[in-house]
Amino acid sequence: MWKIDLESSKWVTFIVFWLFKNVSCNSVAQKIYVELNNTVPCVRLLNATHQIGCQSSISGDTGVIHVLESEADLEWPLSKGPNPPYMVLLESSLFTKSIMMKMKNASSRVAGVVVVPKTSPREFSPHTTCPNENTGVYTETYDSNLAHCNQTVWNPRGNGLSYEEFDFPVFSLKEDNETEVIKQCYFDHNRVVNGSGPQYPLCAMQLFSHMFAVTDTATCMRRSNIDFSSSPVMVCDPLGGYNVWAFIRPYNSTAFGHKENESVVIAAARLDSRAFFLQDSTGAEGSVSGFVTLLAAAQALRQATQEAPPTRNILFAFFHGEVFDYIGSSRMVYNMKNNKFVIDLDNVHSILEIGQVGVRSGSNLFLHSDPVSRRNNTVDDEVTNLVNNLHSSTAGLNFSFVESGFSQPLPPSSFQRFLRARAIPGIVLADHQTAFNNRYYESFYDNAAHLNLTYPSNLSPEEQLEFVTDTAKSLTEVATAVARALFKQAGGNDSQVNNINADPKTVTQMLYGFLVRSNNSWFQAVMAPELKDVLQPNPPQYYVGVAKSSHQANALTYLVQYLLANLTGTATNLTQSQCKKPDELPNESTYVYSYLWVQGMVPPNSTQRESFCVRTAVRRVMAVSPAFDLGDYVSKEYSTWTESQRKFIKARIFLVASRDLEMMTLGVGVAVLFTSLLVTYFVSTKADVLFSAVREPANAAY
Amino acid sequence: MTAAVFFGCAFIAFGPAFSLFIFTIAKDPLRVIILIAGAFFWLVSLLLSSLVWFIATKATNAQDLTLQKDLLIFGCVFSVILQEVFRFAYYRLLRKANEGLAAISEEDGPPLSVREMAYVAGLGFGIMSGAFSMINTLSDSLGPGTVGMFGDSQYYFITSALMTLALTLLHTFWGVVFFEGCERRRWWVIAVVLCLHLMVFSLSLLNPLYVGSILPVYAIMLLMAVWAFFSSGGSLHNITLLWMCRKSNTETSS
């Protein structure tokens, strides 16, 4: 027996682990499949009544690739092609409602669709024509003439593609090497030659995007066994994010409910946006133009409100999740009604909301108000007062405000949720009088180019950050007018008004950071050190996403929070440890303020950042639809949107062989098996005849 | 490619081995043990030779493709030689074991003849070699895609299965011939087996020119089948006996 001593066992263990680490598989799979990594899937969303989005089967959908050249070419995958099902590859100009609906109706022959974004079409909006029509204020009971966009269709170009349901997967690829590989494979194998069908083997693609949730939110919430297990397996997750808000004169944040003798003017804007492919949301005109203007107005008001505080308070509110039936604003109204917010609806004096203000036709901006609530004289007087304040604020600027038609309803806006609860006077600013000027509402093409954000070509990224574009100049003027109007509305001293000016440099830096590149030096300087990896070389995501139980927000929320803190807060001398626990100091209180440690700029002659502590009134509050608190998953009152969970998202291409070859292989295999069984049986029974025994002593033959 | 190809290739590659196992090995537990031990010996030989190859590749530049191909050829030649060495080692082990088994067995003499052990050992080598070559390929054949994206032939799966079938049977015949040669002290048999094994390996290098590799390998397999038949006690006389038996059986029955 040989003993294994400690020395040799150590050697053996070492060799085994080294082998494990270094062995790499060169398996047959690498000869067959090419994995596609840069894909964005269309996912399934559910609400109280419907499911929308796309679904693949649980083991993926495979189809022979067909590159669509025109709408007439659809005949090949839908009827003429001899090798169904097909995986249709579209360029963005062909990604239209009519083509998608034709493919939806022939879904037995279509295994999936892949969209390659290229040039922007002239106009494209996959959203509905009447956004958020069931959760705004215009219901049948409020005013039946204005309900369901009977009076004004806000998004006439909308084709509703984002709200359709497809039972095949739809993916989007970036135009890069992978798309070239697919097209090369198609041209090598799948092309039709002289009218006859292409020869096997054919180039095919498989898409995996299996969604777990079905039917509607109530069904999937029931199937997630939340009530029966301490670690529930969720099938779908409610959408939600964070609202960011700040008062000019902050209150004690633990004292909820009505505040005596306090009157607040709310200045609101929306943060989020969407596209057909949710992770590709851009929202330049749809949301960025609005909240950047409000951030600039907040900065402009800072000096004046600190020197001569106005009588009324001003609340800057940035709502998230507004695209999906007003998640953020309905949460704030719900909190106000249920005494879970520092003020309540009786404290709200008036509301000014900044809608889409980026694409002006002419030099007018339009003021929208609600005709139904203005039938009440007090409300009407207040609205007229606000309109006058706005008119007088444009003195000396290059544009003017014009009231939209008196009988016209409000466009889709967060203000509608406040009106649903109480008839509050308010105005929504927009660059459109009736239908949207935005040709790409809630679409992937609503990007920097749509806002005419152009930079001279010879600038480095840091120089582009500082360059003041024309768009920035026009938004700066809007921000100035908004700031002055808010100051007057809050009862500020008229003599101070002309000193209130928005800073074009801030506006252009914000536009660059939110629409071109969020990883720039200014954004790095205003962020906290532990969040600096949130900044990427592309614009942030504007989709509200799933409400996370951990207190992590997405990049957009953090950016708005820290920017608002930087623009309205004060820098203090606190050290980093004091910044974490400021209550120990005599003049600081975390009930009233929040203290954020930010990175700061890098001085020109050193590499170390000058970090400091900002004292600010900015708060970030979870915004999930009240329907999930109340457990009412079929609510008609609140948003019930959820996003389905999924196994994994994968896409790959490969060649497929003809059915004949496969069957021939199987046939040969079965024949070989049977022949060998027969022959072996025969030989083994006749073995004593076939193999004569060997004459060996003491050797018995079988 | 799909389930059809998976089952087709599995039947092609492992059908004969499976039927040989069922009809000749499965009933006798001693044969099963020798089969498994033979498979293990083959596996150890492959492990050692692949260690050598692995160290050689890691010690050299992985980007130099011609060097890597040459190292692969060297590794395979070394593996062939090592497999035959282990076949000889297994022969010695079985001879020793046979004496021990004869001593403890109830019957008069050893329970298995050398010929039976030769056949079972060869089959063990063959089954393990086939499993090692084919299982990885078979698992990838279950997916929807087939080989060909990077210019390989689309008949990859079928030809792999056919080669595996040939190699399994070849190992069986080589085992029979090898042990018989060792028994009769005819050492040139070992050299011939080694040369034939090396020739089959070099023919497989001709892939994907499948005509050049599969057909000669099957020709060699038929030659080896005839040689193994004769060296395990068969003869033309026995075949004619068999034929006449059948003929007389049919005559008497009809």
Image (tube, grey):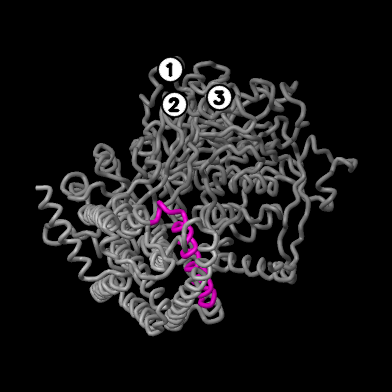
Q: Characterize the magenta stretch by its predominant secondary structure.
A: helix
Crowd band around label 3 with a 10 angstrom C-alpha radius: few (<14), some (14–19), many (20+): many
Residue A574, percent from left and from top: 84, 51
Q: Quadrant of residue A594?
A: top right
Q: Secondary structure at mark 2?
A: loop
> What residue do we see at 75% from left, 35% from top?
A250
Crowd band around label 2 with a 10 angstrom C-alpha radius: few (<14), some (14–19), many (20+): many
Residue type, numbered disc 1: Asp
Q: Earlier in the sequence, mark 2 or mark 3?
A: 2
Q: Secondary structure at mark 3?
A: helix
Highlighted magenta segment, given as a residue range? B25-53
Q: Quadrant of residue A449?
A: bottom left
Residue A239 versus residue B46 in the image, above or below: above
Using residue A566 as the reference point, say whether residue B16 is left or right of it: left
The image's mark for residue B206 is none
Q: Which residue is under mark 3?
A: A627
